[in-house]
Image (cartoon, rainbow, N blue to C red):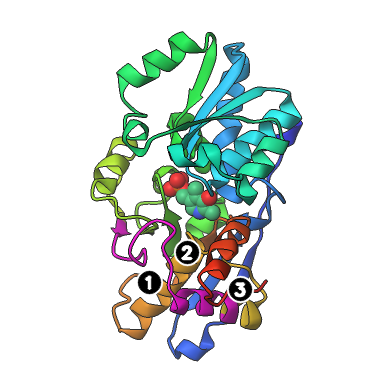
Amino acid sequence: MSFFHNIKTENISLDFSYLNQDLRFYMKREDLIHPIISGNKFRKLKYNLKEFKKNKNSILITFGGAFSNHLLAVAYLGKVERIETLAIVRGEELKNSKLNSTLKKCSDFGMNFDFISRENYRKRNTNEYILELKNKYKNSYIVPEGGTNIFGIKGCEEILTEHDKEFFDVVCVPVGSGGTFSGLVNSSLSNQKILGFSALNNSNINEVINRFVKKNNWKIFDDSCFGGYAKFNNELINFINKFYKSHNIKLDPIYNAKMIFNIIDLINKNKWRFGKNILIINTGGTQSSIGINELLKKKGCETINY
Ligand SMILES: *Cc1c(COP(=O)(O)O)cnc(C)c1O
């Protein structure tokens, strides 16, 4: 258990004075928890690992896309804990192409892959599909995409400290599968507001979160993803580079850059109605920039420079 022992993250003050508002911004540096396991993925694996060990399972199976921070986290965990890991990866076509930088690292950590079509990938949460997997891989422990299950959420309930609960009016976090957000909502005080910035067009994200939370002190912005998961334009890449220059903080292009871009946009458009003491959770994930840069270079676009 030493691997997950005593995680502490720092809140730093962010200088957004150029926005000319009476708002105070802090960033929780979950991105600095671990050099390989990105902040929230670390949190989400803590109790899943405990469960895996308790059940004496022999293989950990999970799901993800080609740039997935979650797959990388699971692969690394598999290596240090000597656990066999298998990833069901979205995209049959990847089977015959060179592994991108994320999947290459996963493979180096000993992870095996099963590449499946997008159509089959959509079935990943159905009972039928899970049963099929369990029959094929005896004594397996299955973690859903992004590590979002009740154990993953339990880990994310440890992100906010007692001080954070008393001090901050608003907590902002990027949203993928909704697990990190749900953990924050569960552990928040009801006079706090939890704002989520969705990284994908997922029309049922509110429904998913409602399955995991009981409070209603939250809101999801679902028009903040630049057209879809892992979609970008020059404006966003430029924003990442400028942000790095002025704050010396690396923002990943899939989650955190989009969130912060949208927070600033809301404020500039005079739509910020959520309180003055603002905590932004930086969930990390900058490893994806390597693979994204490969794509941007091919297209001849500006790349991420950090
Ligand atoms: C996975 C991930 C998220 C989204 O977390 P969910 O719990 O899936 O909503 C946010 N940021 C980064 C860097 C991630 O890797």
Of pointers 1 and 3, the one earlier in the residue sequence: 3
Of pointers 2 and 3, the one earlier in the residue sequence: 3
Query: Distance of mark 2 from mark 3, alpha carbons?
Result: 12 Å
Identify residue for label 3: 13
Magenta region, residue range? 219-242
The reply to whether residue 190 is visible in this rendering is yes
For the residue labelled by badge 3, is the local secondary structure a helix, a strand or a loop? strand
Residue in the image at 24% along x and 42% along y: 207
Residue 269 highlighted magenta (yes or no): no
Residue in the image at 43% along x and 87% along y: 21
Residue in the image at 67% along x and 36% along y: 107
Label 2 amino acid?
A: Phe
Extreme front residue here? 96
Of pointers 1 and 2, the one earlier in the residue sequence: 2
Q: Are marks 1 and 2 in contact (CB under 8 Å)?
A: yes
Q: Which quadrant of the rendered structure holds the C terminus?
A: bottom right
Identify residue for label 2: 168
Identify residue for label 1: 275
**Residue 16 on image: x %, y %:** 53, 83
Is residue 140 shown left or right of residue 249?
left
Residue 241 highlighted magenta (yes or no): yes
